[in-house]
Image (cartoon, rainbow, N blue to C red):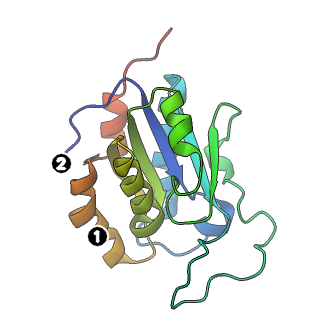
Amino acid sequence: MPLTMLDPNTALIVVDLQKGIVDRSFVHPIDGVVARSRALIDAFRERHLPVVLVNVAGVAPGRTERPPHSGSFPAGWTDFIPELDRQPSDIVVTKRSWGAFANTDLEGRLKALGVTQVVVTGVATGTGVEATARQAYEHGFHVTLALDAMTDARAEAHEYSITNVFPKLGETGTAQDVIDRLPRAST
């Protein structure tokens, strides 16, 4: 469903734009994803709306066919990229699964702030972004996805999420569509 409106208390969730991930190959240039995510960050901060920066520092403990990453990550791997300009007011969530709500305190922190809607951006579309959007939906948040502020290493995963999953979870649009519908800054 195309983006129609944003609730007055909407939070931005930026998924996995961290040093250990952004140097990988993606179907859409990461520089554009970062630039549009940063434009959203600036717009949310200007309006005193919550900005959530999410990084990943491990995997869920369940058994899978693929062995999980073993050992420690290289130094700086979980650090947010400097373009995000992390601020003391940002909510930081470190996850160990695909979605930012699983086994974290994100739901409680957002609800304590009166947040009713989230806008999700980042990487990867078919894993971190989709899982975070699904979990937000399941927790009762209205979900919006800024489609030009996300990408994936796999074209088929990116397209499947955008075409088949996201329209069932919420509304979609561009980063500029989101910015255009944000409430005016409070004084």
The amino acid marked with disc number 2 is Met
The amino acid marked with disc number 1 is Glu
Residue 71: percent from left, percent from top? 77, 80
Closer to us: 28 or 64? 64
Res 31 label: none
Closer to us: 110 or 84? 110
Find disc 1 in the rendering and name its residue.
159
Find disc 2 in the rendering and name its residue.
1
Query: Few, some or many C-alpha atoms within 10 Å of disc 2 (few <14, some 14-19, many ≥20)?
Result: few
Front label number (2 vs 1): 2
Tell me, yes or no, if residue 39 can be seen here: no
Identify the residue at the far left of this view: 1
Tell me, yes or no, if residue 147 can be seen here: yes
Closer to us: 105 or 99? 105
Q: Residue at 31% of width from left, 29% of height from top?
A: 181
| 102 relative position to 175: left or right | right
Residue 23: percent from left, percent from top? 61, 70
Number of numbered discs on residues: 2
